[in-house]
Image: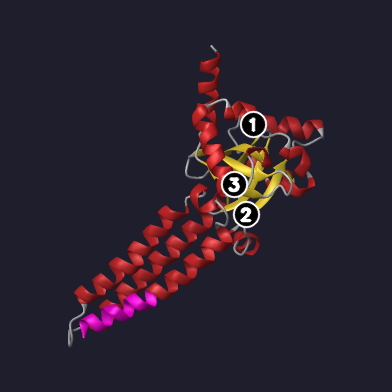
């Protein structure tokens, strides 16, 4: 009987986790965001707690005709539910609300990094069902506002412009200009290892190296990569495992 109860818990938990992670994968972390946004670490924690520890504890605690059995089971189910809500909300806060182009690179701004921080209800209303928005950060044109922003960031340690949606405009309004600000392709292919990775990437996507614009990308998982965009559509194609900053240092050393 205890095996039956534990399996029932497993099947129900499995269905809930599966539906939620499918939603999170396709809505919150589409394209390459699963690799850049830290999806897998939180997802595996959620799976472990709800699909392993939950049924295991039910199996260990369950004993037919045990006094207070119903109470014990309810406590375990409550703990399991709280763990799921905590993990799901953590994944929600971690998911990128914006992919922000600033100066010459893209930065992911997740829900928890938005400034000023929206209230809990505003977070759910604005970002729960939304996929990451591709935007461009624009410095304010008004001199006083520009200076105040610089003072806040430099001297008060407040978040930079890539965390402030009030300064964002949709990427498609600046697509041509942004695509021209990518990393110089000739700099990339002057490094043998980088050139090899670019050729493998372009072959995988049935294109040529110069079909794409390449940008430094800082992800929530603290990994820097190069993000390739289709020059014609300004849509993301995929990431290339090249650290742009290390590559820049290597190219400077080669010149010397």
Is 37 within the magenta?
A: no
Residue 181 rendering spot, x and y as whole percentages: 71, 34
Image quarter (top left, top right, bottom left or bottom right) of the N terminus: bottom left
Q: Is residue 218 left or right of residue 161?
A: left
Contact between labelled residues 2 and 1, with CB atoms less than 8 Å apart? no
Residue at left offset 42%, top offset 59%: 43
Disc nearest the viewer among 3 and 2:
2
Residue at left offset 53%, top offset 42%: 200
Q: Write down the region rendered in magenta.
A: 1-13
Contact between labelled residues 1 and 3, with CB atoms less than 8 Å apart? no
Residue 83 rendering spot, x and y as whole percentages: 38, 64
Disc nearest the viewer among 3 and 1:
1
* Residue 15 sits in quarter: bottom left
Judge whether 5 appears above or below 30 on screen.
Answer: below
Residue beneath disc 3: 109
Residue beneath disc 2: 132
SS state under label 2: loop
Return the residue found at the far bottom.
65
Residue at left offset 49%, top offset 39%: 241
User: Which disc, if any, is residue 185?
Assistant: 1
- Marked residue nearer the N-terminal end (3 or 1): 3
Residue 47 rendering spot, x and y as whole percentages: 37, 64
């Amino acid at each position: 009987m205890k095996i039956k109860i534990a399996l029932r818990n497993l099947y129900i938990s499995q269905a809930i986790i599966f539906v939620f992670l499918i939603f999170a994968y396709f809505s919150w972390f589409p394209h390459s965001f699963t690799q850049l946004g830290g999806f897998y670490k939180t997802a595996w924690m959620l799976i472990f707690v709800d699909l392993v520890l939950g049924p295991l504890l039910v199996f260990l605690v369950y004993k037919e005709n045990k006094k207070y059995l119903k109470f014990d089971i309810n406590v375990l189910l409550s703990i399991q539910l709280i763990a799921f809500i905590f993990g799901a909300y953590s994944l929600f806060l971690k998911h990128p609300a914006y992919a922000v182009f600033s100066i010459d690179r893209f930065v992911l701004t997740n829900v928890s990094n938005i400034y000023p921080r929206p209230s809990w209800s505003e977070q759910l209303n604005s970002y729960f069902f939304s996929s990451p928005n591709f935007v461009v950060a624009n410095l304010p044109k008004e001199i006083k506002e520009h200076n105040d922003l610089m003072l806040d960031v430099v001297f008060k340690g407040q978040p930079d412009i890539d965390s402030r949606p009030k300064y964002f405009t949709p990427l498609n309004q600046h697509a041509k200009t942004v695509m021209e600000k990518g990393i110089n392709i000739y700099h990339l292919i002057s490094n043998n290892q980088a050139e090899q990775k670019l050729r493998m990437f372009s072959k995988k996507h049935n294109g040529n190296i110069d079909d794409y614009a390449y940008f430094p990308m800082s992800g929530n998982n603290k990994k820097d990569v190069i993000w390739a965009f289709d020059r014609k559509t300004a849509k993301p194609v995929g990431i290339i495992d090249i650290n742009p900053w290390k590559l820049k240092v290597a190219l400077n050393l080669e010149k010397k």
